[in-house]
Image (cartoon, rainbow, N blue to C red):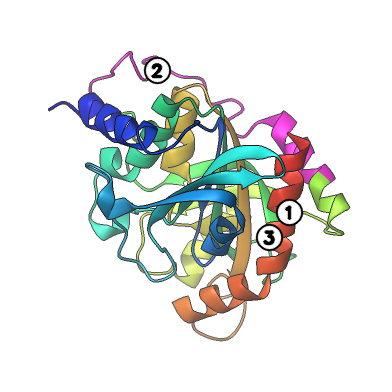
Amino acid sequence: MTYYDSVKDAADAIRARVPALPDTAVVLGSGLGEFANTLEGAVAMPYETLPHWPASRVVGHEGRLVIGAACGRLIAALAGRVHAYEGHDMPTVTFAVRVLGLLGVKTLILTNAAGGVNTGFSAGALMVIDDHINLIGANPLAGPNDDRFGPRFPDMTDVYSPRLRVVADEAGRGAGLTLPHGVYAALLGPSYETPAEIRYLRTIGADAVGMSTVPEAIVARHMGMDVLGISCISNMAAGVLPHPLHHDEVLATTRRVRGQFIALLEGILGGL
């Protein structure tokens, strides 16, 4: 079975379980999966029940696809993602986004928990991603190109839709939030970055750093989707504050801002 066939197999299995298909999807990052529980009339599909679907083993990533209504719009919510640092290759990391594309999703909202590189940020801020820097060491489009997914050389000038960034700003104002904008750098992980690496990232223009999102965004643009990225600054990166980093801090911060995050997502969905 080819990679395209396995993606199509998963998409067909989802089609068989729901009466209608969404044109909007949200990928929920570490500790942010609670939004999936707010969807109305939801059909929930644990990843292990979908053919070929990779399961995340990371704390804070629940591992289910939920299709339901929010703000009068049918959406798909992925509560949890897989990462390259778990040992997955790029086709596996981006499998879910490929499936969403075959289902007809046109708008993809990618969320993550990220470390704050910009010293003007504070833990709990919600940052709109304007652009990214791929330092994972791999590109999900490397290798033979399947034209059924997209073109060989897709443009990445506006990976993150300017129109959707305006929608996010308006939603933020409606929720009483001031949303900083910035550049997201993706590294392989799973170790957190060193203070020297954070100084380097700051020098090359990064405002936040994480271990996801970028491969998904590249693949989504390859398939013609409009992409919006939102980072929850869950902690300040190494060397910014005088204490070590821990994943528990990430989850604690995302729990603290859960209400703001859900309000922002609902505002964005209502403004599409």
Q: CA distance from mark 3 to mark 1?
A: 5 Å
Residue 261 — which label?
Answer: 3
Q: Left of 197 or right of it: where is 176? A: right
Image marks 1 and 2: residues in contact by CB distance under 8 Å: no
Image quadrant in which you'd find residue 261: bottom right
In depth, the one of 21 and 219 nearer the eye is 21
Q: Which element is circle 2 on? A: loop
Q: Could you tell me the amino acid type at mark 3?
A: Phe
Q: Left of 94 or right of it: where is 181? A: right
Q: Is residue 126 visible?
A: no
Could you classify mark 3 by the number of other residues whose Cα lies within 10 Å: few (under 14), some (14-19), or many (20 or more)? many
x, y (%) of residue 269?
70, 41
* The N terminus sits in image quarter: top left
Identify which residue is drawn at 36% across, 61% down. 189
Above-or-below relation of 123 to 79: below
Identify which residue is drawn at 61% across, 28% down. 158
Dominant secondary structure (helix, strand or loop) of the stretch shown in magenta: loop
Identify which residue is drawn at 78% across, 54% down. 179
Residue range of the region highlighted in magenta in the rendering: 144-170
Above-or-below relation of 215 to 63: above
x, y (%) of residue 124?
68, 69
Of the two numbered discs 1 and 2 in the rendering, the one whose residue sits closer to the viewer:
1
x, y (%) of residue 21?
49, 31
* The C terminus sits in image quarter: top right
Residue 264 — which label?
Answer: 1
